[in-house]
Image (cartoon, rainbow, N blue to C red):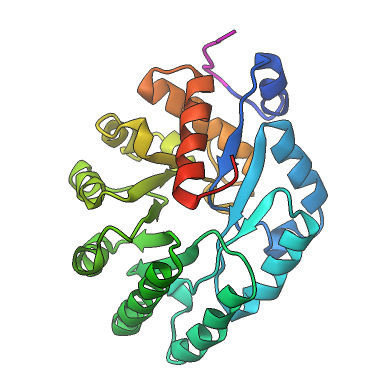
């Protein structure tokens, strides 16, 4: 049974998955559930996710400090949580090489689904751009060596990122532009690479974001769902802590954009994530 959702509240969201009575499955391809914001209620957060059909959550790393908490969460929820490893561009400082040298051997010790979260951030500190570029290049090299996708953080930095990926892209490089909020031209640039998808989260629900118009020209085969929890909560939770169960709200909005049943949005975006990250189906 398919229904049209016009309003979703905190009351109905936890029950929506069961109400639809369809075998929907979602993958949250980007969430930081190992952060302190979830320390007191992580079991409840996981229950909410499973109750809304989110049975797989991919966890990008931030820096050396976050590694232990990331690994602990994966150990506590091994059937749900899948780790990535990488150095976030906002954590790229003068000592970035020591950070990278600490992370690289970890790939020989554990299974990671991606090299991430990596990329370039020109919002907070433009002075570190040369360092960010070098860290980005090195980690792209890891991905090629290890046959893993990259998860790209691109904040006010599409031009800088495109310059690097234009040079290094080949048949062995694949990944996702996390939290994509770019223009139609930038979306086409990404699609032209051949191996990249766009991660769509709560920003899709924001009234003046402009993302809905951009997505209309992007086939849903190139989209994966994400939350970036605890950040960027979708409407009607904007301003509150984000969590993986809210990927359902993103899917509801996406079903309107593409004029598709939500079950089809769930099926296609989940398949996209399985293929990109080579997850067990």
User: In the rendered image, is residue 237 in sight?
Assistant: no
Q: Residue furthest top?
A: 1
**Residue 97 lies in what quarter of the image?**
bottom left
Q: Position of residue 80 (x, y in %)?
A: 70, 48
Query: Quadrant of the image for the N terminus?
Result: top right
* Left or right: 225 in relation to 111: left
Q: Give whichever of 171, 89 is nearer the camera.
A: 171
What's the residue at 72%, 60% (across, down)? Answer: 74
Q: Is residue 164 above or below residue 92?
A: above
Magenta part mainly helix, strand or loop? Answer: loop
* Left or right: 170 in relation to 105: left
Q: Is residue 223 above or below residue 134?
A: above
**Residue 258 lies in what quarter of the image?**
top left
User: In the rendered image, is residue 134 in sight?
Assistant: yes
Query: Quadrant of the image for the C terminus?
Result: top right
Q: Position of residue 205 (x, y in %)?
A: 45, 34
What's the residue at 31%, 37% (across, down)? Answer: 210
Q: Give whichever of 180, 101 is nearer the camera.
A: 101
Tell me where the magenta segment starts and ends, as one range.
1-7
Q: Give whichever of 34, 239 is nearer the camera.
A: 34
What's the residue at 56%, 31% (across, down)? Answer: 249
* Left or right: 178 in relation to 110: left
Q: Position of residue 242 (x, y in %)?
A: 61, 47
């Amino acid at each position: 049974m398919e229904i049209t959702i016009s309003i979703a509240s905190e009351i109905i969201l936890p029950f929506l998955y069961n109400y639809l009575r369809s075998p929907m499955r979602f993958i949250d391809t980007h969430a930081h559930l190992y952060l302190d914001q979830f320390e007191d209620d992580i079991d409840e957060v996981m229950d909410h996710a499973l109750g809304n059909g989110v049975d797989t959550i991919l966890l990008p790393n931030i820096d050396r400090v976050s590694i232990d908490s990331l690994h602990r969460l994966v150990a506590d929820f091994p059937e749900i949580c899948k780790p990535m490893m990488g150095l976030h561009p906002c954590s790229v400082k003068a000592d970035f090489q020591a950070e990278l040298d600490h992370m690289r051997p970890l790939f020989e010790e554990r299974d990671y689904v991606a090299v991430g979260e990596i990329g370039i951030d020109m919002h907070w500190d433009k002075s570190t751009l040369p360092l960010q570029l070098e860290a980005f290049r090195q980690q792209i090299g890891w991905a090629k060596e290890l046959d893993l996708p990259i998860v790209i953080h691109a904040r006010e930095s599409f031009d800088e990122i495109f310059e690097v990926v234009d040079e290094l892209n080949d048949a062995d490089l694949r990944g996702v532009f996390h939290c994509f909020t770019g223009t139609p031209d930038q979306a086409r640039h990404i699609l032209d690479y051949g191996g990249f998808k766009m991660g769509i989260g709560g920003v899709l629900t924001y009234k003046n974001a402009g993302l809905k118009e951009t997505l209309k020209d992007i086939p849903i085969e190139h989209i994966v769902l994400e939350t970036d929890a605890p950040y960027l909560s979708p409407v009607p939770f904007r301003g509150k802590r984000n969590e993986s169960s809210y990927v359902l709200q993103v899917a509801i909005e996406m079903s309107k954009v593409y004029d598709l049943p939500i079950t089809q949005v769930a099926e296609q975006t989940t398949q996209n994530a399985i293929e990109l990250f080579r997850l067990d189906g």
